[in-house]
Amino acid sequence: MAIQCPHPRQRMGRFIGYHIPLSFVFFIAIVACGPTVAQDAVRKEAERWSPRLTLQDAIDRALAASPGLQAARAGIASARGAERQAKLLPNPEFSLEVENFKGSGPYRDLDSAELTYGVSQNIELGGKRSARRQAATAERKAAEMASESARLDLIRAVKVAYTQAAAAEHSLTLALELESIAKRVLYNVTERVKAAREPEIQQSKAEVAYAASSAARQRAANTCAAKRKALSRFWREAAFPERLSVEYIFSFPEPEALEIYEARLARSPDIARFGRLTEAREAELKLARAGVVPDPKITVGVRQFRDTDEQALVAGVSIPFPVFNWNQGEIARSGAEIVRADNEHRQAEIDQVGQLTDAWSQWQSAWVEARNLKETILPQAERAFRLTLEGYRAGRFSYLEVLDAQRTLFEARVEQVDALIRLHLARADVERLAAIATPEQKEVKP
């Protein structure tokens, strides 16, 4: 599933306005600006040692604060309660009967009354209790699988938000550097124009470039703040002070063979949950069929004769006589539920295999593109720019040729970041579908 990057996905649109100021980068190599470079070095060193929020830190915070996971755990507790209840026997019943009182003659009071008190117990036949217990156990396992699916959904969502926020931070860092470069270039171009070493049109271009870089920096700052805020909402905080790990964006994880993820997919909690629900529906059908078998009620008691003050045992049994109700409707309903659960299970497998194949293909494609950019295109673009810059110093190339080489290098860097973002988003989808747990989290076995 494609996720929008911090800026629009046009080839150059993500850093609109950057290509103009960046085209003057070669001036920095020509013009001595030692104090400014030193200040940049100090700033970068400070950023290097500032606190970092890793992806695993963000996942841990989100897992600890998620109300959705807490609700899923409550669902498991509820299912366990139902499972415990399904194992219990029916309660016995105590009964008391009074006969032959408040009548006439000797039966005017309780002296000649007959008291019968006893205990009745319903005996479940046909495997009702076993089927009820099997259904409750399957429902509890399904609730556990649903909880694990919710956890994996949350992890994937955090990965996506973290990728977007880290990319936005990188964009802001680049925007700040470009604005600083444009400012220094504007100063040097202005000095060269004053000394009649450059035409006045170059100063106008530098002014436009600086204004565009300032606007781009502001957009990047707004985007960065929004993406960081979206990430912090996972642990219900307004913001967080740490910087994100940009190194995560520039990693190159290669996908394993598709068959490996497909094998894991069959054991994922999403698929396993449907299997447990099918088991529950089958147990419910067994319970419905067992409902055809009548359950006898056995009664044992004592009868007391008040007029003679004697006692005698009383025993009895009652059995429902199934004439009209053979539990036909419940049997039909349970059978249809099995068919529905089985088909939903098969459809889920088909859908998940298709989603996994698409996500894996996007991951593989983005990885190939990112590797090609890193190993071939970027080194060539950097070499071409370096040679062009050296030729400009020696008078062999024109100013426009240097600009073109610089623009090509910048476009390659933009393409690299774009490919890496697509790589990480596709990877998050694959890992979610294949139920790949994070290092600090254990998988729930189906």
Image: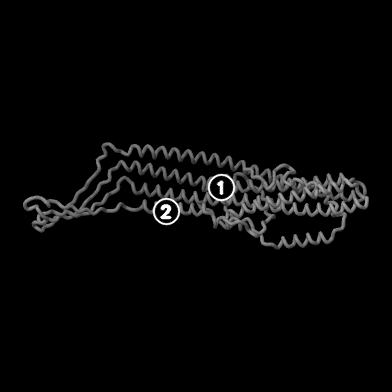
Quadrant in the rendering for residue 40:
bottom right
Position of the N terminus by quadrant: top right
Q: Nearer the viewer, mark 1 or mark 2?
A: 2
Near mark 2 (Cα within 10 A), the count class, few <14, some 14-19 or many ≥20, is: some
Please tell me which residue is depicted at 35% across the width and 44% down the height of the picture: 287
Q: Which of 111 and 122 is in front in this view?
A: 111
Q: In this view, does 101 lie to the left or right of 418?
A: left
Residue hosting label 2: 80
Q: Does the rendering let one see residue 208?
A: yes
**Residue 317 locus on image (x, y percent):** 21, 48
The three-letter amino acid code for the residue at tag 2 is Arg
Q: Which of marks 1 and 2 is nearer the N terminus?
A: 2
Residue hosting label 1: 264
**Residue 210 locus on image (x, y percent):** 80, 50
State whether residue 336 is above or below residue 242: above
**SS assignment at label 1:** helix
**Residue 418 locus on image (x, y percent):** 70, 46
**Residue 404 locus on image (x, y percent):** 83, 44
The three-letter amino acid code for the residue at tag 1 is Arg
